Image: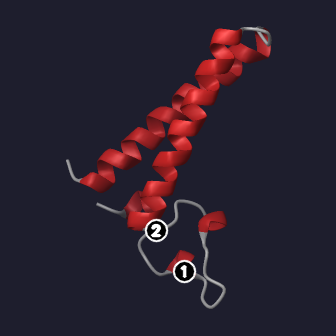
């Protein structure tokens, strides 16, 4: 598997984990272990998204950094990349 797919797979796993922790914390808001896990996976996801954006371009329009050109439309969409 290439680096881009591997990194995108990690981001998807972190998204799933964060959603599950979100749902758990809705009913267990004082669970310190779950809160710590949420922070850990939020940070892991943030680093993975930063790395992906740096290497392969933005995953979302909010990540476009150019003031000169709307780069979101330059490359294939993230789900179209192979």
In the rendered image, residue 57, in percent from the top left (x then y), is placed at: 46, 68
Q: Which label sits on residue 34?
A: none
Q: Residue furthest left?
A: 1
Location of residue 53 in the rendering, given as x and y in whole percent from the top left corner: 48, 62
Compared across the picture, whether 79 is left or right of 58 comes to left
Disc 1 versus disc 2: distance between alpha carbons?
9 Å
Label 1 residue SS: helix
- In the image, residue 45 lies at what x, y percent? 52, 41
- Residue bearing the label numbered 1: 71
**Label 1 close to label 2 by CB (< 8 Å):** yes
Relative horizontal placement of residue 13, taking residue 41 as reference (left or right): left
Residue at left offset 40%, top offset 39%: 10
Does residue 16 appear left or right of residue 51 in this picture? right
Query: Residue 57: which disc?
Result: 2
Between 34 and 77, the residue placed more toward the observer is: 34
Question: Which residue sits at x=69%, y=24%?
Answer: 22
Q: Quadrant of residue 66?
A: bottom right
Query: Which percent across, then down, holds residue 19?
Result: 62, 28
Q: Is residue 1 above or below residue 52?
A: above
4, 78: nearer the viewer: 4
**On screen, residue 60 above or below 14:** below
> Measuring 63% from the left and 91% from the top, which residue is drawn there?
68
The quadrant holding residue 15 is top right
């Amino acid at each position: 598997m290439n680096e881009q797919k591997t990194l995108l797979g990690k981001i998807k796993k972190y998204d799933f984990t964060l959603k599950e922790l979100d749902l758990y914390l809705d009913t267990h808001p004082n669970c310190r272990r779950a809160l710590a896990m949420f922070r850990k996976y939020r940070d892991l996801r943030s680093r993975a998204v930063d790395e992906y954006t740096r290497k392969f371009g933005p995953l979302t329009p909010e990540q476009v950094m150019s003031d000169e050109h709307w780069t979101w439309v330059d490359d294939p969409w993230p789900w179209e990349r192979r």
